[in-house]
Image (tube, rainbow, N blue to C red):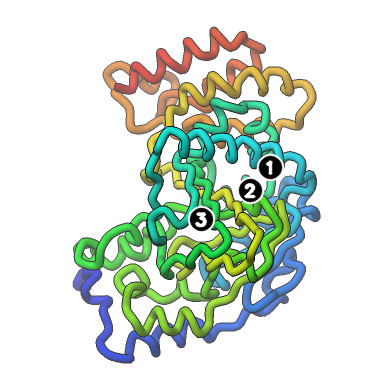
Amino acid sequence: MTAVEYGSGRRLAGDATARRLAEALDDPVDLVDYPHAAEVVSEVLVYDARDWAGIDGADRWGLRAELAQALAGGPGVVLLRGAFPDTFVVDAVTEVFWRIIAEERAAGTDVGDHFGKPGANSRIWNAQEKLARRAPGAFADYFANDPIAIVSEAWLGPAYQMTSQVNVVHPGGAAQSPHCDYHLGFMDDATAEAFPAHVHDLSSALTLQGGVAHCDMSVESGPTMVLPHSQKFPWGYVGYRRSDVKEMFADRMVQLPMRKGDVLFFNPALLHGAGSNRSVDVERVANLLQVSSAFGRAMESLDRVAMCEAVYPVLLEHAGEWPQWAIDNVIASCAEGYPFPTNLDRDQPVGGLAPASQADLVRRALSASQPTAVMAAAIREADQRRI
């Protein structure tokens, strides 16, 4: 029988940790292995997402397989150029974000940062729900985006849960500490070490990290710092606070400039952090996407019933105009796509292995052109059965 290794077994002494991290980093990308990519820049795979327009069938499956390989065994990070070719969509959402920031500041809301100095940045927590409820039309235009859906499906499969948090780094704002991300990345070392090694391996498959550029980001303005290939380093979740790991990150991390509408996606086990904004006039605005597997737990709790009720009239309006994939992308970004956990006494899987999910009910309502009130009553009744 093979012994089960726990997180503490992944601690290396002395400079052995830095050596193992260096070994993980010294695995250069070969562009031949990624036929859909446009180029490799500083070990980051760069894609022109405008080339993905209308991709379907076997081509879509092949692209998703390539992206999954890039995030797992490749550099662990991909940059999508032109993911939002119509930046007016991004601008409309940015205007909503600024209004929310102003309102929360006026209300005296104290907004912190996981890995940065409190108060140095402006944050919007639960931006996903706030956007859906305040500006459902802008929400639908934004999350109809297919490149975001393609990468989310590539890493997590269907029924993923979309959440987002806006981060504004002001001129002079300091960088975040390098870190790995949710789940285990949000624990102290002792807590993370209590989880067995196979959970450390699994953690990064439960979420996907991304960031939409809501302005042009020069390197001076501090776009996300990433350390390509560091997701292959198995001690990341119990090692990112070590001084030798931080030193190697500082020596070898890369930052790529981004244009408004570009999107950066990376494996949550990749060492990364927001950069210092050394500019004098750039308010660096990014919408940080945290996409969760249907089989995991999202960090934020969202009122997805209210979100569906707000966005559904927009979907009903566009049902005869938009392609089905765009409608499906918006539903995936607001509705709960997985039917569990539920109360099986009240929410029984009649006619199948599982009861209908919230997303199923929204799609059914759209196909029947049901009024918003009818759809809302159905998902609220279903929500009550789950309790």
| Secondary element at tag 2 | helix
- Left or right, 386 with respect to 36, comes to left
What's the residue type where badge 3 is placed?
A: Gln
- Please tell me which residue lies in front, 162 or 71: 162
Residue depicted at x 48% and y 22%: 306
Q: State the separation of the CA atoms marked 2 and 1.
A: 6 Å
| Secondary element at tag 3 | strand
Q: Are marks 3 and 1 in contact (CB under 8 Å)?
A: no
Crowding at dot 3, Cα within 10 Å, few <14 / some 14-19 / many 20+, comes out as many
Q: State the separation of the CA atoms marked 3 and 1.
A: 16 Å
Q: Split into 4 quadrants, where in the image is the C terminus? A: top left
Q: Position of residue 60 (x, y in %)?
A: 70, 51
| Secondary element at tag 1 | loop
Q: Which residue is mark 2?
A: 148
Q: Hey, which quadrant is residue 257 in on the image?
A: bottom right
Q: Is residue 284 above or below residue 98?
A: below
Q: Which residue is mark 1?
A: 145
Q: Split into 4 quadrants, where in the image is the N terminus? A: bottom left
Residue 209: assigned label: 3
Residue depicted at x 65% and y 38%: 95
Q: Is residue 341 above or below residue 205?
A: above
Q: Are marks 2 and 1 in contact (CB under 8 Å)?
A: yes
First in residue order: circle 3 vs circle 1: 1
- Please tell me which residue lies in front, 383 or 158: 383
What's the residue type where badge 2 is placed?
A: Ile
